[in-house]
Image (cartoon, rainbow, N blue to C red):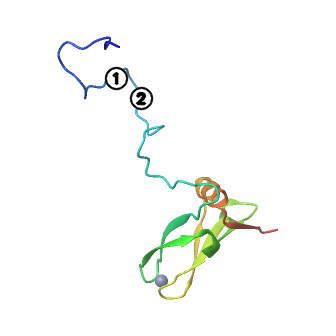
Amino acid sequence: MAPTSGPGSRGSEDPGGSGGSGGSGGSPGVRDVAVVPGAPVAFKAACPDCRARFELDAGALRLVIGVSRRTTFYSFTCPECGIQVRKPAGERIVELLTGGGVSTLRSV
Ligand SMILES: [Zn+2]
């Protein structure tokens, strides 16, 4: 197959630069957490108290979904200092955690 347009330059030019395609959609090398069904998922978290950074699997996290955003949060126990950390969970985080197999509680 011959390239449709290419006066000399070969390879690393982007042919479709027409306007507002400034997204991170569908490119290989996404940096989001990939959730593979059946595989253990590691969630990156950080402790606000001792500032340790670690990865937690789904079993170490709990997600609580309340009736409002204020009562929707996720929690985990810091493996470094042992405190229980609570952080507000937005919609994306809720999706990510539930998709990753984190046990979800519904606060009534
Ligand atoms: Zn800590």
Is 70 or 52 nearer to us in this picture?
52
Residue furthest to the left in view is 8
- Which amino acid lies under the numbered mark 1 shown in the image of this protein? Gly
Residue located 65% across and 56% down the image: 99
- The quadrant in which the C terminus is found is bottom right
Task: Give percent across and percent down for residue 29.
Answer: 41, 46
Residue located 54% across and 88% down the image: 82
Secondary structure found at label 2: loop
Task: Give percent across and percent down for residue 18.
Answer: 37, 20
Q: Residue 68's quadrant in the figure?
A: bottom right
Write down the residue under mark 2. Answer: 21
Is 86 or 68 nearer to us in this picture?
86
- Which amino acid lies under the numbered mark 2 shown in the image of this protein? Ser
Q: Is residue 102 above or below residue 13?
A: below
Task: Give percent across and percent down for residue 107.
Answer: 78, 69
Real-space Cα separation, disc 1 to disc 2, in angstroms:
8 Å
**Crowdedness of circle 2 by 10 Å Cα count: few (<14), some, many (20+)?**
few
Write down the residue under mark 1. Answer: 17
Image side of residue 50 versus residue 89, left or right: left
Q: Are marks 1 and 2 in contact (CB under 8 Å)?
A: yes
Image side of residue 55 versus residue 73, left or right: left
**Crowdedness of circle 1 by 10 Å Cα count: few (<14), some, many (20+)?**
few
Q: Residue 35's quadrant in the figure?
A: bottom right
Residue located 32% across and 11% down the image: 4
Task: Give percent across and percent down for residue 94.
Answer: 64, 58
Secondary structure found at label 1: loop
Residue furthest to the right in view is 108
- The quadrant in which the N terminus is found is top left
